Amino acid sequence: MTSQTAHAEPAEAAIADTTAIAVDVDRVSKIFRGETEVRALDDVSVGIRKNEFFTLLGPSGCGKTTLLRLIAGFEPPTMGAIRLGTRDISRLPPNQRPINTVFQNYALFPHMSVAQNIAFGLEMLGKPKAEVQRTVDEMLRLVRMEELKNRRTSEISGGQQQRVALARALAPHPEVLLLDEPLSALDLKLRKDMQIELKRLQHETGITFIFVTHDQEEALTMSDRVAVMSAGKILQVGRPRDIYERPAERFVANFIGESNFLDATLSGGTVELAAGGRFDVRVPEGVRDGAVSVLVRPEHASVRSGEAAEGETGATVENVVYSGEATVVHLRLATGEAMKIRLANAPQGGEAPPQTGGAAAIRIAPGAVTVLKD
Amino acid sequence: MSAQAETPFPPGALEREAETADTRRRWLLSLPAIAIIVCAAAGPLLVMVIYSFLTPGDYGNVKWEFSLEGWMNTIVQRDIFDDTLIWADAHLSIFWRSFSLSLITTILTLIIGVPTAWFVATQPPGRREFWLFLVTVPFWTNLLVRTIAIQELIRSEGVINLVLLKIGIIDEPLQMMFTDFAIGFGMTYVYLPLMVLPVYAAVDKLDFRLVEAAHDLYASRWTAFRRVILPLIKPGIIAGSILVFVPCLGAYVTPRVLGGGKNLMFGNLIELQFGAGRNWPLGAALSLMLMAAVMVALIFYVRITSREKADG
């Protein structure tokens, strides 16, 4: 119970101790030995809670899909253990784990109808015919596919296939549902709908969802908690808001949302920006006084035309980009650092944004400055 | 010319023009195929049909006199002494032997060929070519040479008997040559690649994520094979079975070398009519019968397998 919270924030750890753990990944490493040795997972520990919508987020090749495959049982871990609750399932074959997967390309059986696909898992579990029939009907209703139950899977659209894949994986009522980038093949509109649909399904079924994606927006909007992965390691685990506002490392900040990285000097809980301005900050564990890198999100600062007053930072406007709901102002600070600030657009006639080439004053919101570990 | 070019075409005329040109081109491209089919398949077949209704010549060949004798002789034969008609049970038993041996051979090649194809298709991409190459190596040598090599293995003084005698499992050599076993063994060896290759192609196309999905949905290895893999590689199995069964029915060289003169198969029976038997019309009629039997068997087989598919 200690290892899986190793990467969590102190506040998270307290919650974790009181909430039941559904999947306990305990110091798991996975090494693929081919012509070259690839360490796909490097000493990963994480505890996924019951009934949680948990997302593994990271760029391709970060090990998120490998971790999912290990939990599903398609590959054994090279080191470490995976537990379901307290039961070690590391060596169980996939057909003996109460875990189902929604595959990236759905992997629907092409020689079976929609209903037969959904019934497959139930039949394999040896459920009586009447129960299979009942559950299949229930699942068809849940994913709104009743009319298409007798269609071949090749005769339905991508979004419909997606829903059948979901229904098929949910039908045996697994303890944990794994979703491997299930939305990546859908177009934007459909993806947004399915995001809401997935949240609804998770809520209605009360099953623990482990969701893999490289789409940070998807991760932030859907998850209860997110684990950001890179190069086979979990960098940070936390609620979407914590991950976004308090990223622990530059990689996390960079991967999620847009970022301004500024040079600063830390001394006893206060940073002084090289470009000017002092801010009280929360100092992450292991960061010493001295030169540090800080993060300011573009929407956590404002900018106006004119010379900087007390508590503001002076800059030159390099570019102003209008993008509908916001205007992004690109600035050059006195130190030569670049910074961009996103201003929400008011109706026309309000205060005009700064003009290109002019002097500008930046005001950074209190609490908007985050000290990064590296 | 210029006046003609300025005349506006009726709507759709250009498209129709292009379409007919397209059709013409397609016909032109298929001309070689049509020529081959006509010369190599339809033509000889017509000759066989005509010959089967003619009278046998004295020294082979045919006399151009219409006769039903050829067809009659396939099922009945005229007694040499009193001209009474009796059932040609020799033909029937030969046909039955051909049919059952072909069936057994097909089943054996399935049992050996499907795991082999699976093994090759699941090798890493670089090594697959090597195994495929090994599968096709027998084609590089003449069929007769390969069959004689088998003879060398199974004859009374052959390798198998020598080894078995040496280690004392048997006291006297097993009689394997000139038996149905020898024919089945030889044909299984000869036709195995024809099963492996189409099944390999089917397994190669198989999406292994479907197998993972089956395991994920609680299917054991055997159930995943039966419910997911088998239905998906069925086209390959059907193609392989046809490729093995059909030439087996008409096999000639292998039964001749390994089965000797006693264990005739249908192919040998036909050959006999065109050779020593000097009864070309009978040979032609038997050939056509064999062809009809193959077609009936195929229709039956495809019907059964596709009905299973519809049932899911």
Image (cartoon, rainbow, N blue to C red):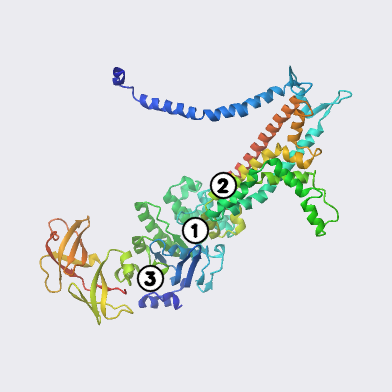
Q: Quadrant of the C terminus of chain A?
A: bottom left
Say which amino acid is labelled 1.
Answer: Ala
Q: Residue furthest bottom?
A: A268
* Rendering coords of residue A273 (x, y %): 20, 74
* Rendering coords of residue B261 (x, y %): 80, 37
Residue carrying label 2: B201
Q: Residue B235 falls in which quadrant of the image?
A: top right
Dot 1 and dot 2 residues touching (CB under 8 Å): no
Nearer the observer: mark 3 or 1; the answer is 3
Near mark 3 (Cα within 10 A), the count class, few <14, some 14-19 or many ≥20, is some
Residue carrying label 1: A169
Left or right of B232 in this view: B81: right
Residue for point 56% across, 62% down: A95
Res A212 seen here: yes
Q: Nearer the viewer, residue A29 or B191?
A: B191
Say which amino acid is labelled 3.
Answer: Leu
Left or right of A192 in this view: A101: right
Q: Nearer the viewer, residue A181 or A148?
A: A181
